[in-house]
Image (cartoon, rainbow, N blue to C red):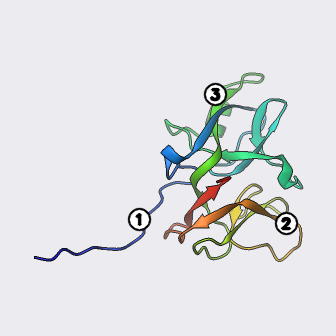
Amino acid sequence: MTGSSILFTPDFGYAGALTRPSHSTVEPVVMSTDKPFAGDGLMGKKVAGKFVPISEGDAVTVFFGIRVRSYPFMSDSDLARQLTTPYNHTGDALTRGYIAVKVNAGTVTDNVPVFVRVKGGTKEKPIGGFEAEADKTEGNTVALTNARFIGAADANGIAEVAFNI
């Protein structure tokens, strides 16, 4: 009896989920209750020793890593409501490896460039979010030359990114 294979790409899960943990470098970071991330799987930077979301107009040179989804699953904004300033909490930042991200624009195919939104953010296309094409307005996105998409996005618009490999 011959065997058969079913070839399909499974869902990647959630933005910020590590897709290949054994091949990734994740650093513990101190997060800021004053500047919580809007979600997981967004680009961040270090400011005064704290890992915070990138700001409008930031250059690619300030990017530090990608926000890794918390476990247990509590959002940064939930933690920020529970803690008061100046208390901060710990989190994780992917500095090298593979992670699932929400793709906010463009069509993902294997090995296409990765762009990060740095201007003109909206709810659908947040600052620090990932896109598979440059924005039509010059300067709204920057190419992340040390990253590439792996394969295609799943039905939920989540795709795997190889970062700093």
Q: Is residue 137 above or below residue 142?
A: below
Percent x, y for residue 39?
Answer: 64, 49
Q: Which residue is mark 2?
A: 140
At 82% from the left edge and 58% from the top edge, which residue is drawn? 118
Contact? badges 1 and 3 (CB < 8 Å)? no
Q: In the drawing, what numbered circle is on residue 10?
A: 1
Percent x, y for residue 25?
Answer: 60, 41
Q: Amino acid at mark 2?
A: Asn
Is label 1 or label 2 in front? Answer: 1
Is label 1 or label 3 in front? Answer: 1
Q: Name the residue nearer the viewer: 134 or 33.
A: 134
Q: Name the residue nearer the viewer: 133 or 89.
A: 133
Q: Is residue 3 above or below residue 101?
A: below
At 78% from the left edge and 61% from the top edge, which residue is drawn? 117
Is any atom of residue 35 visible in this view?
yes
Q: Is residue 37 above or below residue 112?
A: above
Name the element at disc 3.
Answer: helix
Contact? badges 1 and 2 (CB < 8 Å)? no
At 85% from the left edge and 30% from the top edge, which residue is drawn? 48
Is label 2 or label 3 in front? Answer: 2
Q: In the drawing, what numbered circle is on residue 82?
A: 3
Is any atom of residue 40 visible in this view?
no
**Cα distance in 3D space between marks 1 and 2:** 31 Å
Residue 135, by quadrant, is: bottom right
Name the element at disc 2.
Answer: loop
Q: Residues within 10 Å of mark 3 (few under 14, many from 20)?
A: few
In the picture, the quarter occupied by the N terminus is bottom left
Q: Residues within 10 Å of mark 2 (few under 14, many from 20)?
A: some
Percent x, y for residue 99?
Answer: 57, 53
Q: Amino acid at mark 1?
A: Pro
